Amino acid sequence: MLQILLQAASIQQLLLGGRAKFDLNRITPLVLFLHTIKQNFVPGLILMDKLKQHNKDLSNDKSKKILALEKEVAFGLWIQVVGQIIELIALSELLQVREDENTVGEEQILTGVWLRTIGQIIEAVSVSKQINETNLLKLSQQQKLAITGDLLVSIGSGYEVFGGINVLEEETVTPPRIVP
């Protein structure tokens, strides 16, 4: 405390150019106030720095968790791509094995599966590229590409629905009854 008083007196002497005399009664309240500030606010600043570091650590943990989840999403999309390709190959072979003349509905279903497969591949590639992308323009382009893939998947699904309806109608058509 005495050291703080002496430093304050030295500062006062420098500021006033040696014109003022050291007056302990005038300096003491100022020094005590400065000392109180130091005792109360410096630990607060240290605490704030520690809180900032803690928040940064939490942010890093959150960023790592987000990255891990984004990788899982991409992995799931690639699993879907594999499933789509398996379905596409099997349906193509099934259509070739069948020798029905009325295959309009099955061809529509196959076309829908092709659209879904292409859309799924586009989405999986673009989401995979987004994971470590830092360039905002490229990230935005990849997001738009993923949306385009989703659109193709949706259109393909709709086309499959119409194909399924046609197949159902083809299979449920009954021959006309001849009334004697």
Image (cartoon, grey):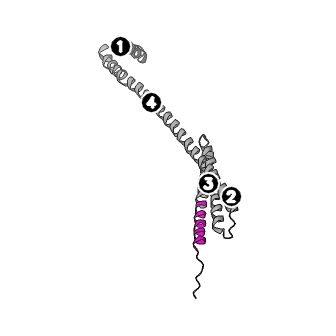
- Residue 40 at x, y = what percent? 35, 23
Is the C-beta separation of discs 3 and 2 under 8 Å? no
Up the image or down, 104 lies above or below 22; here it is: below
The CA span between labels 2 and 4 is: 59 Å
Residue extent of the magenta highlight: 156-174
Q: Which residue is mark 4?
A: 54
**Residue 37 magenta:** no
The CA span between labels 3 and 4 is: 40 Å
- Which one is in front in this view, the residue at disc 1 or the one at disc 2? 2
Q: Which residue is mark 1?
A: 5
Q: Secondary structure at mark 4?
A: helix
Residue type, numbered disc 4:
His
Name which of mark 3 and mark 4 comes first in the sequence.
4
Q: Which residue is mark 2?
A: 93
Q: Residue at x 42, y 18 (%)?
A: 15
Q: Which residue is mark 3?
A: 149
The CA span between labels 3 and 2 is: 25 Å
Q: Secondary structure at mark 2?
A: helix
Name which of mark 1 and mark 4 comes first in the sequence.
1
